[in-house]
């Protein structure tokens, strides 16, 4: 995140929603990631949260009135509008959506929204009826049409006690949705990246399954990196500890055969296919239809091989498509990776050591190497999964 937000100028518009306090966490995260944040509070927001909190969190003066900033040219509205990389309005009330949609300029925030050419991201927060109201929906449609971006709202219990769609999406996700909008790298714009992620569950009976330890962290890091480089991203994921990033299309599956089907039906439109899932090599030949009861005797399961998803994708590869596999190995890492690359006819294999403290399932770091045809091997130092994802897309760019 630091790589993406460092030195970016972000105007954080806070409006008069009960969720205004959550904007403190957004400000704090953006500052942590190196952004320079200018907090702007509407008159209603000031009734709910204190400008001093935002000043303490960002180290910058909070703008609350249109005419005050004239004293300070740094926060004069045209100056800020010009230098901002992003306007993030979180939480966004029904009122700010209406004012922005109609081009009103009756306070600092709306005036500056008209003056800026930076991307604008709204994180709506309001009562479910207010959100569903045709006026609000029409305002959102107008803003979208003009190129504004939206994150959320989510469904759940609202501050007013009602349950429905209207909760501001959580601060971490708001920041995640902002990342592609400030990213300097857009080389995958117009490209579609298809990623498999997570584990598989192969049923033994209706309550038991054979699974594996994949956490989904590598797939998540890859999807996020592709998004910040401008790609459209589809993640076909089995059960995982972490969800794919905001902005990715998510296809949830359980078994390897379901994953194979989901990938096959999306292959045609993908420019880059990356197999980061820990696909179950075997399934139980005939899963029991009722729960297997203890009988005192040993139970034998006959396993049968599952389809090879990434080899199949490589075999159907159309010209220009790049297909990358992952080889998670506990021994003879590079030999196994080279063999996998050749047998499956992949463009690249990311060989990663599993079962070690600083590398493998569930770990945030990984010891990996890139293996290309002709046994060309690039060994990498211990990297975070985010760093490995960035290095991989740099390498893929060379292949495209
Ligand atoms: C305690 C309280 C909580 C509110 N929460 C919301 C909210 O979550 N969403 C919303 O659209 N309006 C909410 N409102 C109403 C807005 O504050 C009101 O429409 C105001 O005009 C918004 O102004 P602004 O968009 O300029 O900040 C709330 C009002 C009060 C008194």
Image (tube, helix red, strand yellow):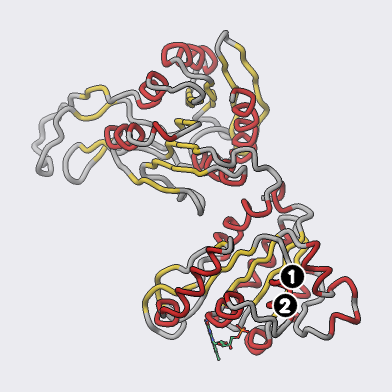
Quadrant position of the C terminus in the picture: top right
User: Where is 354 relative to 50, above or below?
Assistant: above
Q: Nearer the viewer, residue 365 or 372?
A: 372
Identity of the residue drawn at 40% across and 84% down:
161
Determine whether the residue tagged by mark 1 lies in a helix, strand or loop.
helix
Ligand 1 rendered quadrant: bottom right
Q: Which residue is mark 2?
A: 111
Residue 211 at least partly seen: no
Locate residue 332, reporting x and y percent. 51, 15
Q: Which residue is mark 1?
A: 115
**With 244 as the anchor, is 37 left or right in this view?**
right
Identify the image quadrant of residue 148.
Answer: bottom right
Identify the image quadrant of residue 202.
Answer: top left
Confirm or reject: label 2 Cβ below 8 Å from ligand 1. no
Locate residue 26, reporting x and y percent. 64, 66
Locate residue 323, reporting x and y percent. 48, 25
Q: Are marks 1 and 2 in contact (CB under 8 Å)?
A: yes
What is the crowding at mark 2: few (fewer than 14 residues within 10 Å), some, or many (at least 20)?
A: some
Q: Nearer the viewer, residue 327 or 302?
A: 327
Identity of the residue drawn at 45% across and 74% down:
137
Residue 133 at least partly seen: yes
Say which mark, if any, is on residue 256. none
Identity of the residue drawn at 54% across and 21% down:
348
**With 249 as the anchor, is 360 left or right in this view?**
right
């Amino acid at each position: 995140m630091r790589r993406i937000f460092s030195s970016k100028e972000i105007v954080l518009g806070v409006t008069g929603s009960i969720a205004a306090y959550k904007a403190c966490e957004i400000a704090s995260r953006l500052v942590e990631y190196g952004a320079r944040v200018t907090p702007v509070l509407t008159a209603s927001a000031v009734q709910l949260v204190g400008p001093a909190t935002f000043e303490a969190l960002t180290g910058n003066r909070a703008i609350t009135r249109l005419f005050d900033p004239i004293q300070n040219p740094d926060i004069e509205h045209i100056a800020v509008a010009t230098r901002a990389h992003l306007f993030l309005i979180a939480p966004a009330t029904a009122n700010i959506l209406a004012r922005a949609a109609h081009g009103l300029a009756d306070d600092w925030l709306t005036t500056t929204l008209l003056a800026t050419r930076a991307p604008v991201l709204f994180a709506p927060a309001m009562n479910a009826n207010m959100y569903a109201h045709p006026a609000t929906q029409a305002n959102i449609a107008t803003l979208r049409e003009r190129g504004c971006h939206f994150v959320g709202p989510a469904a759940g219990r609202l501050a007013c006690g009602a349950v429905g769609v209207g909760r501001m999406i959580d601060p971490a996700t708001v920041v995640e949705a902002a990342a592609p909008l400030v990213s300097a790298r857009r080389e995958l714009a117009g490209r579609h990246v298809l990623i498999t992620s997570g584990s598989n569950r192969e049923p033994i009976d209706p309550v038991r399954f054979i699974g594996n330890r994949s956490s989904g962290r590598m797939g998540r890091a890859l999807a996020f990196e592709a998004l910040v480089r401008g790609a459209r991203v589809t993640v076909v994921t089995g059960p995982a500890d972490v969800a794919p990033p905001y902005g990715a299309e998510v296809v949830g599956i359980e078994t390897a055969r379901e994953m194979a089907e989901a990938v096959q039906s999306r292959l045609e439109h993908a420019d880059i296919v990356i197999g980061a899932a820990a696909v179950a090599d075997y399934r139980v030949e005939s899963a029991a239809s009722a729960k297997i009861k203890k009988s005192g005797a040993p139970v034998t399961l006959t396993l049968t091989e599952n389809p090879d998803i990434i080899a199949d994708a490589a075999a159907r590869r159309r010209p220009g498509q790049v297909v990358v596999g992952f080889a998670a190995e506990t021994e003879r890492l590079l030999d196994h990776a080279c063999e996998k690359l050749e047998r499956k006819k992949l463009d690249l294999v990311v060989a990663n050591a599993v079962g070690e403290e600083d590398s493998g399932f569930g770990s945030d770091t990984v010891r990996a190497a890139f293996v290309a045809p002709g046994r060309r091997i690039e060994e990498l130092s211990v990297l975070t999964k985010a760093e490995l994802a960035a290095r991989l897309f740099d390498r893929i760019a060379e292949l495209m």
